[in-house]
Amino acid sequence: MNIHEYQGKQVLKEIGAPVSPGIAIFDASEAKAAAEELGGPLWVVKSQIHAGGRGKGKFIEETAGEQGGVRLARSVDEVVTFAEQMLGSTLVTEQTSDEGKVVNRLYIEHGSDIETELYLSIIINRDTSRVSFIASTEGGMDIEAVAHDTPEKVINFDVDPATGFQPHHGRTLAKALGLSGQLAKQAGKLGKTLYNGFLAKDMAMLEINPLIVNGDGNLHCLDAKISFDENALFRHPDVVAMKDETESDPKEVEAQKYDLSYVALDGNIGCMVNGAGLAMSTMDIIKLYGAEPANFLDVGGGATKENIVAAFKILTSDDKVEGILINIFGGIMKCDIIAQGAVDAVKEVGLEVPLVVRLEGTNVEAGKAIIDNSGLNVISADDLDDAAKKIVAAVGG
């Protein structure tokens, strides 16, 4: 689960990391009061979307001005002008689609005197099953280019969970950031603070770019990008409350209400499957026969008829879907429940695209009988290979 920068700054402040004062606004009418409360002489007005590269981004609307999604303001009036231009406008960055994302909120932050820009992030290293620090002296908007062109300038190291963050990790971090003296001590302290917060909050990724040395000679977190392990969210209701559903695909939001695992893709064949491995196999074989899956949808092993109806509605709500493949191997999940759910869903929402159903496993004969007796135009398949060929052929592949 991702959160916005201003929310990430709240989390960093809670765990004791140094951040600038700032105020989030949702309407341009709030900009003047926010700027006056923060005080000048310099403010930073930041678009809040779940995408990087905001500073170099461009707005689609001409009324939003020619500057990017992060702007420096040198007066209260300028803060207000930027807020009026940016809120409600569509920002396109290197990490969005060409359609961009609508800016529904801004973060107005007190301007900082920047001496040096550094890069620092913490992730889960899947290869070592440990928390890993990534640091560079080359912070700022072009860190991707640094990693590509001069990888030797990007240093990473793991922390053993048995020991936690130790003084030698702090020295390694300081060296990677090119810091010495009091700044090296600050780096060690900050590294430990962030490591402990990373674990306590069940983060999946924490990126501070840039981490700066400010005019007072202190380390300061000027940006914050944080994502959390969704499997651990039940432990953090405060984090769940930060979720911005406008940043998610509406179909994915709806799927979560029914405990469905759904990810939208760019293809034209909707897939309803039980089990992640079976879902991956189904998507692979669709591609093998020349078509593209429109989604990953795992209804799980304990889905009810209501879950199946909800899943079917989600599939049919996608305008890109030109055909649907239901591929169920019944173990705990019974084939007759899947079949009845599919039939009820078709009767409720209609069926305007080809539907291929392949059932196997527990109560498979009962499931097939339900479909055969439904009177619906459903294509039956004997196995996965047969199902994939039939649905690809049905959509003209």
Image (spheres, helix red, strand yellow):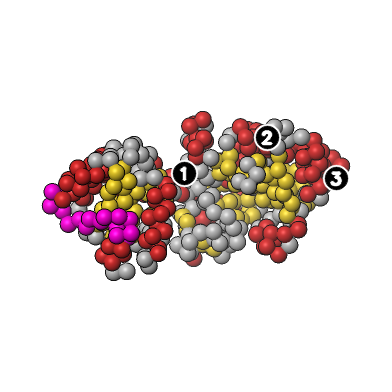
Instruction: Please provide percent x and percent y for residue 115.
Output: 78, 51
Compared across the picture, whether 20 is left or right of 263 comes to right
Compared across the picture, whether 4 is left or right of 186 comes to left
What's the residue at 73%, 62% (across, down)? 150
Of 13 and 122, nearer the camera is 122
Kind of residue at badge 3: Ser
Q: Please, which residue is most extreme toward the right here?
A: 181
Instruction: Tell me which numbered mark, 3 or 1, is placed earlier along the sequence.
Output: 3
Instruction: Please provide percent x and percent y for residue 53.
Output: 59, 58
Judging by the rendered image, the residue that carries numbered circle 1 is 244
Instruction: Tell me which numbered mark, 2 or 3, is placed earlier along the sequence.
Output: 2
Of 100 and 369, nearer the camera is 369
What's the residue at 28%, 40% (across, down)? 362
Instruction: Tell me which numbered mark, 2 or 1, is placed earlier along the sequence.
Output: 2
Of the two numbered discs 3 and 1 in the rendering, the one whose residue sits closer to the viewer: 3
Q: Which mark, residue 180?
A: 3
Q: Please, which residue is most extreme toward the bottom here?
A: 396
Magenta range: 373-388
